[in-house]
Structure formats: C-alpha cells, structure tokens
Amino acid sequence: MLCACSGEQFKFEDALQSPESLATRDFLASGLSSWTGDWESKLDDVQVDEAESTLKEALSLNFEEARALLGRLEYQRGNFDAALQVFQGIDIKVSLLLEAILLKAKSLEELEHFRDAAKECNIILEVVEAAFPSGMHEGIAEDCKLQEVFHKVLVLLPNLWKKAGFLSEAITAYRRVLVKPWNLDPLRIANVQKDLAATLLYGGVETSLPAHLQVWGSATPNGNMEEAILLLLILVQKVAYGEIKWDADIMDHLTFAFTVTGQFELLAGFVEQALPGIYERANRWYLLALCYAAADRNEVALNLLKKVSGQSEANHKPHIPALLFGSKLSSQDPKHALYGITFARNAIDLADQANDHFKGQAHKFLGVCYGNAARVSISDSERAHFQKESLTSLNSAALNMKEDPELVFNLSLENAVQRNLDVAFDNAMMYSNMVNNDSGRAGSLDQLELLRLRAVLQIAQEQPKQAIETYRILLSLIQAQRGPQSDLENVAERKIEMAAWQDLATIYTKVDSWRDAEICVNKAKSVDLYSPKSWHTSGLLFEAQSLYKEALVSFSIALSIEPDYVPSIVSTAIVLVQIGNESSLQIARSFLMNAVRLEPTNHDTWRNLGLIAKMEGSLEQAVEYFQAAYELEMSAPVEAFK
Amino acid sequence: MSSSNPDSNAHSCIQSLSSILSSVPSSVSSSSNPSFSLLHDPTITSEISSLLRLPDSGSGDNNLCRWLYDTFHSTDPELKLVVLRFVPIIAGVYLTRISLRKSLAGFEAIVLALYAHETTARDGQPVTVNVPDLSQPSIYHEAKGSVKNKATELNLAVISPTLEPHGTMRSSRRARIVGVALELYYSKISQMPVSSKMEFCEFCDIWAAGQKSEESKGKKERRIPLPWELLQPSLRILGHCLLGSQKSKELLEAASMATKSLYNRCLHDVDAKGILATSSLLRLEQMALDPKLNVDHTEIDGNVLSL
C-alpha cells in the first residue's frame, strides 16, 4: 500500500485499531482517493472494482460498506453519475440491519434487561418515524421486510416497558402505535387497542395525552378511564360491524369499566348486542338481569329472571344464582310475592351440594315473600297457611344466618304482624344492637324503620305514650338527617316520615288531643298532599269531634285521590250511618258493599253492615254479618300493618 | 410542621417516630431521601403494621395514630404518601372493630383527615367521566356514517359523587368516608409498595368472608356490611393488584384470593353490581394466566368453588 504523500509502503494494520471508526475511515479514504487521482466522471466497472477492493483491504470494510463509502465520496465530489453507478451495485440491506437491532432487543428481553431492550426498540422507531412522519400508507413502504420488522418493534415496545415496570412509557408507546396509520392489520390494531385499554384501566398511573394529541376538543379523552372507555367502545363497535371476532376480554373490561362508572343500562345494551351463540341463553338473561337490577330497573330484571327459570330452559341445568336473585327481587314488592315463592322454593329444592350455602338466603327471601303473600291474600285459610310458612322459612334461615341484620329485622316484623309480640320485641332489640354498631348502609333508613316498628308495637300493646315518644325520636332523627342521599333513600325516608305523622295523628285522635292531631295531619300533608291516608286521618279527626260534614268532605277528597281506598269508603259509610236518615242508610250500605267487593276480609266493613241491618230490623242478617266481622277481627294482623 | 424545608419535616417526623417504635434503623434516619426511605423501609413499616394491629391501637390517645395524623398534615407530599401506605391496615382494622364497642377515635381522626383532604382537593366537584359518543371522530377512530353536526351532548358518568364536609364520623356516613380514603389511596397506588397492596388484599378477604376473631370470645363470624361506597373503590384497587401490576407473583396470588372471596360474598348477598365486577375480574385473570384455556367466558357460575 503506497502512502498518499510519499508513495512509500505503509502498513495500515497498526493505524487501524478500530475499523468501525468511520471518521478514521473517512480521513483515510479521502487520503486514498486523492492518491488515486482524479477520476473521470464515468467509471467502468473494473475501475470501480479496483477502487473498491483497495478500500476494502485498506479499511477492512465489507462489500456494502466499501461501496457505500465510495458512493458517498463520489456524491460529495459532485460526480452524481458515478455515485449512482456505485450505489446501484449495492443491495441496500437496511431491513437486515433493523432486524438485527430487533433481535438484539429480543435477546435483551430474554435476559430480562427490559429497559435496555426498550431503548433499542426506540432507536428503530425513531428512525422509521423520522422517515415517515405522517405514518405509512399502503404502498409507500416498498420493502416488505422493513415494514414487517417495524411492525414487530411497534408491538414489542409497549410490552417491554410493561415488563420493565414503566407503565407511563408503555402507555405512550401504545398510543404511538395507534395515532398514526402504520399499515398494521386490523387484528393487530385491535389487540393493541385492547392492551392499551387494559393498561389504562388497571395500571393506576394517570398518563395524560401529550399536547399535540389534545386537538379533538370535547372528544379528547380526559383521563385514563375516559380513554379506556373510548377504546373499548371502538372495539365493541368493530365486533358489531364484523371487523374483528368477539373477544370475551373486551366485554369483561367493558363490564368492569361500566360497573365502576355506574353505566348499567349502557352495558345491558352491549350484552344484548352480542350475536346469538356467544352467550348461553340463560346466562345472557341472567347477565342482563344483573345489569338492569343494578340500574334500579327491577321489573325488567324480574321479567328476565322469569325467563331463565321458564319453560324454554326446562331442559337445562337449573340456574341457581338466577333463582336466588329472582327471589330477592320479588321479596321487595308484595305484588311479586307468589313468583318469589316459586323462585325461592326452586332455589332450595334444586340446589346441589355445591350451592348449599345459598340455602339460608333462599329461606330468608322465601319467608319474606310468604309474609307479603299473606298480607295481600283474600282467602282466610290461604293467609294462615302463608303466615305459618313465613315464620317456618325465616326461622329455618336463622339456623345458618343468625348474624344477618336483614333476617333479624324481618323476623321481628313478621312476628309483630302475627301478634307474637314478645318474640317481635326481642328480635327488634337484637336488630337495634346490630344496626347501632355496624358501619354502612344499615344506618339511617333501617334505623327509622326499626323505630316505626317499635312504635307500632307499642300502639298494639296499648302504650300510646311510649309510641308518641318513639315517633318523636324518629321524626327528630329524620330532621337531623338532612344530608345528601340517593333519590331512593330520600323517597323512602319521606314515606316513613309521612307515615309517622299519620300514625301520631291517629294516636292523638284516639286520646282526644284534637289540636295535636290536627298539627300532625297537616305535617303529613306537607310531605305529600296527595296521600289518601292523610285525608282519611283528617276525616277520622273530624268524625271524633262529631263534625260529620267536614268528615265527609275529607273522606271524599281521599276517595277522589284513590277511589278504591277502602278505609275511607268504610268511614264514609259509618258517618252516613251516624247521620241516620233513611236515604243515607241506603247510600251507606252501597258504600259498604263496594268495600266488601274490594277487600273482603276487612272486619270493619262487615261490622257496619251488621249495624245497618240491625237498624233496619233484619236481625238474622245482622247476626250473620256480626259473626263474620268477629271471626275476621280475630285473625286480622295488627292494625297499623294494613 | 411550620418549616418549609421538606427534609427537615421528614427528619423531625422520623425523630418523633423513634420515640414510638422500638428502634429506627440508621439507614432511614441518616438517609439522604428520608421520606422515600420511610415509605419503603421494611423494618419500620412492618413494625408500624404490627403496632396498628394491637387490640387497643385505634384509641384516641394512641401515639402512633397521633403520629400518622400529624405526618399526614405535613406540607411534604412524600410524607403524606407514607401515611397513605398504611390506609389498608387502618381501614381494615377500623372496620372490623366497629362491632366490638372499642374506642376508635384515633383511627377515625386519620380517616377523617384523609376525607377532608379529598373534600378540599375536589372543591365541591364530583369525579366524572364522559362516556364518548362514537359518532364523533376521535384520536383512535373515524366516525362511521355521517358526522352529526350538533354539539355532542355530554354523557357524564359519576365515578365519585360530590363530597360533603364531615367533621365527625357518623355510622350512616362511615362507608362513604372510608371509601373516599380508599379512593385517595388508589390515586397514588403506583407509588405504594407491594407490601401495602398485599395488606389491602388481606383485608378484602376479611371484609368479605368475616373473620373468626378471638377477641369476640367464640362468637360466630361477623361479616362487615359491604355497601357500594366501600366496594367500588376496593374493586378498583383489586383490579390494579390483579391485572395492572405485573411484578409480584405473591401479590397476584393474594389479589386472586381476595377477588374470589369478594365474588362469593357478592353472590351470597345477591349484590348485582358486585357480581358483575368481580366475575369480570376473575375471568380476566383466568384468561391472562392461560389464554389457551377454553374457559366458557360467559358462564357466571353459581358453583363458586369451581372458580
């Protein structure tokens, strides 16, 4: 090798300690080229080969490197044709290079150097992103291999960050994949969207969008939860349009997100949207019932649950959770009592070994439903049967669930209704102890109900003073509780308040404290003017003061609010009887007949029919009526529970 | 803490702590980043945890509660994190002792302080999320069909309703107040050490299934009522432990057990919201463990033992 300047033999091996040092090579190469003299603008291949092999030997370059260097030299000297010629001879293996970096990253991953691996990936991404600032569109990337490597890196990077524990960087990396088009196939995009949604939902690291992405105005997601929901909704839409297959994970993430954010009806909509076959039919109904019940739409939920245990599912395994759920929802409304009994009985009878621990709950709901059924029953024997079953079931539940406050409360209530007043009191005290200590919702509303129960028991035991005192406590608790509550809680509390005022008015009326009674009635009316019972109570107050005209007016108002309000019908008849002339007796009787039709077990109705019969001289008929009234009165529940 | 220098705050904190604990390792007291050391030092945190579990730990005159209360009121946010780290134990022990008629004024003071902090921070606003309308394009999708020109109506979902200030603990508000303390804990969960998260999982287990406590002299298990105000933030924390943090296998196991316990409890109580959330978490965990497992994803099984 001749030296550039002196032409002497020169050994390059010593000088070239680091052949990778491009700067060194450059320097030497420019030296060499000046030595090789001026080249003509067009070279022939032989000359190129020679120059190339010279360079190769001199600088330990490989074929591609040598040519690349040569080409650059020519370019820099302005010999574009020559440069082009040189370059065309090289098969530029950029993609191989990138793949090498990718494999380096993957090796680091295997060795668990996740952060280093991530950094390697970043290099690739930065290079490619710089080359394609607005993403890759179809057809732009001519080198398929390059695109393939790039795609692998895109998808690998966020996973590496996650493994390294850098969730914020992972989220940023996920977003990088999604916000520009990179020609990824739809399934891959969907997977990335799903993984990003999961990281946003559960990662616990709020990573706000960078400023340049916050350009979508009100559609810019604000916070991790919003962004996750946006992604999940997009994914669900893709499933709906058939762009991707159903994926249970998507639905589970969505369920979690919507449960936390209280969007149950929306969730139900998506469950309904799933194509047939995705869910087993009974399960779909059960799932929907859960959603609708969570959204406080119990009627809808119940209908769905009836279907689960209905004819169409007769050939399938019984769905115990659905049965239990059905019995719970039914127990909350007397009109569903009979369905509730069926649900609960089925739950108990069909439950296998594994579901044994549900039986206590099932018995509890069964007991409550029987109690409700008894109260709305018209047949005497049926009512007695239901009441007996109710206590049996509740006591059976108490065998496994002694500490359940709801059960104790219901035991107290049902025993009170059936006039087992001592047991009722014991349970009421037990409940009171539980409630006073426990945290949570067993606070206000249940306490108020307990107090009302206690007052009613005191009335039944003819202790009006104690009852008045209890009501006083109840009402002052309500006054003190003017805090923010859910709508349901508010409504329930207003109901109890109004009932308390009505009961107080009744007590005061009975003990002839007219003024106090009047105040209480007006308070009741201020809670809800359109309650028939409030007007009825007014009427009773007037009646006690022998103000019959005023009494009739009040009863008429009650009946105009609710034409089938039996107590007012009966009371109207009673007042008419008091007025006592021939025609009013006839009218009174027709009122009472109406009342009998509506509520055949009301003993007051029968007794007054008897009175009218007696006044008209039909003594035998009067006796029959009185007999009926007596028997009904003996088996009637405590008055205030009607 | 009147000094504005965070380091001196941390140092005086550590000093007062040393009179409560048996010893404070020198690695902490002479550390260059004392609050960070306090947060992560295993000796100190395990001793504090043990002290908090003692039978009379929550009373009004308890030194440790006092220290936690004062430390939370420090101006150094790192020191607040130290107190937050112990929220699972404090909330857990507090709730399990309600029925035992003990004085819990110490715990209540801390929990109320956390609640007050959040009340101030949220400034009367609820925490909401906007459920997006897909008919408007976003950074992740183009709208299908014609874009509605009218302004999108916001569909606001409430994650946490507006907070009312509460100076004292009332039984009707207890669940909400403790729930808000848990929400605060969740907001910083990425900075909480694994041991704290494990404690949370342990308490979820206890809340769900009740504990046979020796203190109640052989009484049967007392379950703690789990209203939604308490359950919802707990589920978010559990979701993170189960699916959001990949690092600790132990944590994963603890979270899995806790989620199963809560699932069983929700099934027993027939709590629709709880069933929906816990069953989803459990299925997601199964899929993550073995994606090839042919789980029937739609099965909400009454046979809880098989899960």
Image: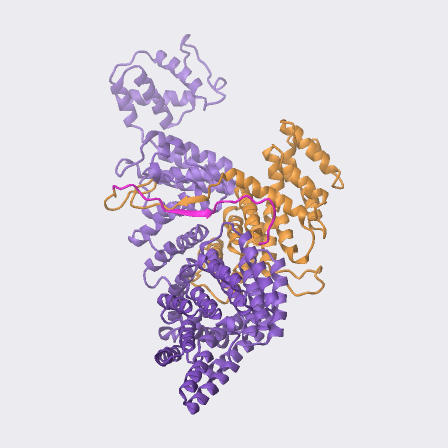
Picture coordinates of residue B135, whole percent (x, y): 29, 45
Which residue is nearer to you in this view: B284 or A72?
Answer: B284
Q: According to the colouring, which chain is purple?
A: A
Which residue is nearer to you in this view: A642 or A82?
Answer: A642
Left or right of A48 on screen, residue B114: right
In this orientation, does residue A610 appear? Answer: yes
Q: Residue furthest front?
A: A581
User: Picture quarter containing residue B221?
Assistant: bottom right
- Decide whether residue A104 is among the magenta residues: no
Q: Which residues are magenta?
A: B149-171
User: Picture quarter containing residue B26?
Assistant: top right
Quadrant placement of the N terminus of chain B: top right
In this picture the colour scheme is by chain
Q: Main secondary structure of the magenta part?
A: loop
Q: Residue at x 30, y 18 (%)?
A: A75
User: Picture quarter containing residue A427?
Assistant: bottom right
Picture coordinates of residue B64, whole percent (x, y): 70, 43
- Decide whether residue B158 is among the magenta residues: yes
Which residue is nearer to you in this view: B258 or A243?
Answer: B258
**Does residue B77 sit above or below A366 in this rendering?**
above
Which residue is nearer to you in this view: A478 or A86?
Answer: A478
Q: Colour of chain B?
A: orange
**Does residue B293 sit above or below A362 in this rendering?**
above
Q: Residue at x 25, y 15 (%)?
A: A41
Q: Residue at x 44, y 61 (%)?
A: B295
Picture coordinates of residue B130, whole percent (x, y): 39, 44
Picture coordinates of residue A57, whole percent (x, y): 41, 22
**Does residue A398 sit above or below A75 in this rendering?**
below
In this orientation, does residue B27 appear? Answer: no
Q: Residue furthest bottom?
A: A620
